């Protein structure tokens, strides 16, 4: 036990950590590249991957010089390969390559910064190859939390949270190994529609929903924040990361996003982690764990935030929180159904095929319809995801319900 605890520390002092970033062209991915470039003494960039943004992937390969590049979209392979022909970089394409590349002996930590269910299989392959996981891709834990945490335990790999709330809890738990958690409070900004009514949500435009008050993030998580499904997903993520019972997880709206989350211990003491809303800090903490690396990130100034305020989440208006609580209680394949339906609904909203307030309705209808499995294996989850997506598309095509 002692040796295992010391090992990551030992490694981080003596050797550079070799990093693979899945989803380097996204919001988390681009920030991770900046973190790694500033901490060259500690990190070596091995792999970067993208779905289809070949232009940015090529720029990143030129600038950050990784050993390997993967583009999931096979039709972009020739473009990427030719553009990088003068560099000593291996280029691969396709989803299978993503799953293979994470198993390389040249990697210590895989940062899962891709969005959605697509992160599941590469994360599983990386765990099986005994890579530590810096986990940004929360959908993976929502879909298959039990399976992933058991697998991580069996393979003795760490799941290091990148999500700011979970990083906060993880940081509060440092040095508290033998002290049980009584409760955690996940803080939520409340999103752009905090304080609004159900009626208002029916009028929401794209521009309004894509404008988060405190964070600049990818489109999917920005919409999840506006519906508050993001906090629902994070409750499930927290449950698995910290082995909690549902009754130990609470959500509190904190519009300033300065306190990133709170742990309450059995003596009543509460520890909170705070700082400016900046994802580079949790990214760096996960990659460098257990070290804290000196950084030049902007520092917090109390006098610029004289009021830190707290409110109850409005679950009548933001019903996605109720859906997530229900999915968490019932468990089985229900969180997987909820996630797949939500991904389709958010995608349809972004393509202007679905009104904002219908995102939750569509998700709920899928949760009611798709057949429940109490103890799903990986195959069941893969099938549940496919079946839910198909059903959600059928619902979307019934214009009378969802136009
Ligand atoms: P994003 O949309 O900005 O980027 C997603 C990345 O994933 C891109 O590089 C894209 O090329 C890649 N990708 C998408 N689909 C893929 C597929 N099918 N196959 C391979 N690659 C694919 O997303 P983001 O905002 O960076 O979020 C990434 C993950 O991190 C999400 O799970 C999100 O919930 C989580 N997260 C993000 C933030 C944030 O501040 N952005 C904060 C906390 C957690
Ligand atoms: Mg978060």
Image: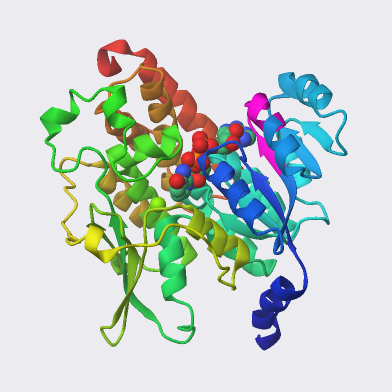
Q: Is residue 1 left or right of residue 96?
A: left
Examine the image and state in which quarter residue 80 appears: top right
Q: Residue 233: horizontal and vertical position, in percent?
A: 39, 49
Magenta highlight on residue 57? yes
Depicted 349 relative to depicted 367: above or below: above
Viewport quadrant of the C terminus: top left
Rendered position, 321 above or below 249: above
Q: Is residue 373 visible?
A: no
Q: How is the image coloured?
A: rainbow
Magenta stretch in the rendered image: 48-58
Residue 136 at what x, y percent from top left? 52, 51
Q: Residue at x 30, y 52 (%)?
A: 325
The front one of 301 and 156 is: 301
Residue 294: which quarter of the image? bottom right
The answer to whether residue 48 is above or below residue 53 is below
Residue at the image position 29 percent from the left and 38 percent from the top:
226
**Rendered-image quadrant of the N terminus:** bottom right
Residue at horizontal 54%, vertical 56%? Answer: 283
Give residue 122's quadrant in the image: top right
Queried whether the magenta region covers residue 70, the answer comes back as no
Q: On the rendered structure, is 142 left or right of 364?
A: right
Q: Is residue 306 left or right of residue 323?
A: left
């Amino acid at each position: 036990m002692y040796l295992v605890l010391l090992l990551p520390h030992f490694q981080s002092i003596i050797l550079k950590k070799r990093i693979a970033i899945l989803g380097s062209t996204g919001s988390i991915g681009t920030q991770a590249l900046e973190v790694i470039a500033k901490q060259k003494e500690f990190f070596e960039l091995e792999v970067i991957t993208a779905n289809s943004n070949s232009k940015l992937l090529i720029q990143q390969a030129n600038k950050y010089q990784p050993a390997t590049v993967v583009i999931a979209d096979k039709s972009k392979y020739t473009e990427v390969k030719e553009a990088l022909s003068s560099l000593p970089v291996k280029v691969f394409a396709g989803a299978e390559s993503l799953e293979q590349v994470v198993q390389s002996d040249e990697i210590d930590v895989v940062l899962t910064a891709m969005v959605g269910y697509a992160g599941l299989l590469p994360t599983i392959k990386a765990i099986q190859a005994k890579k530590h996981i810096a986990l940004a891709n929360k959908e993976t834990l929502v879909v298959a939390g039990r399976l992933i945490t058991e697998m991580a335990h069996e393979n003795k790999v760490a799941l290091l949270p990148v999500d700011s709330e979970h990083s906060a809890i993880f940081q509060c738990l440092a040095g508290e190994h033998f002290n049980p958690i009584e409760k955690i409070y996940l803080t939520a900004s409340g999103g752009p529609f905090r304080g609004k009514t159900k009626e208002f949500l029916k009028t929401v435009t794209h521009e309004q929903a894509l404008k988060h008050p405190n964070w600049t993030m990818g489109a999917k998580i920005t919409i999840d924040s506006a519906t508050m499904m993001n906090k629902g997903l994070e409750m499930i993520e927290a449950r698995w990361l910290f082995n909690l019972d549902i009754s130990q997880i609470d959500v509190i709206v904190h519009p300033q996003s300065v306190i990133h989350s709170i742990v309450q211990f059995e003596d009543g003491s509460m520890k909170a982690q705070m700082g400016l809303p900046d994802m580079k800090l949790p990214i760096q903490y996960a990659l460098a764990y257990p070290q804290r690396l000196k950084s030049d990130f902007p520092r917090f100034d109390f006098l610029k935030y004289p009021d830190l305020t707290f409110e109850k989440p409005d679950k009548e208006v933001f019903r996605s929180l109720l859906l997530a609580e229900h999915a968490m209680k019932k468990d089985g394949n229900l969180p997987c159904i909820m996630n797949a339906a939500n991904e389709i609904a958010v995608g349809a909203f972004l393509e202007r095929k679905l009104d904002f307030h219908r995102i939750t309705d569509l998700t709920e209808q899928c949760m009611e319809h798709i057949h429940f499995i109490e103890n799903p294996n990986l195959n069941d989850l893969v099938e549940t995801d496919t079946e839910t997506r198909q059903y959600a598309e059928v619902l979307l095509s019934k214009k009378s319900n969802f136009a």
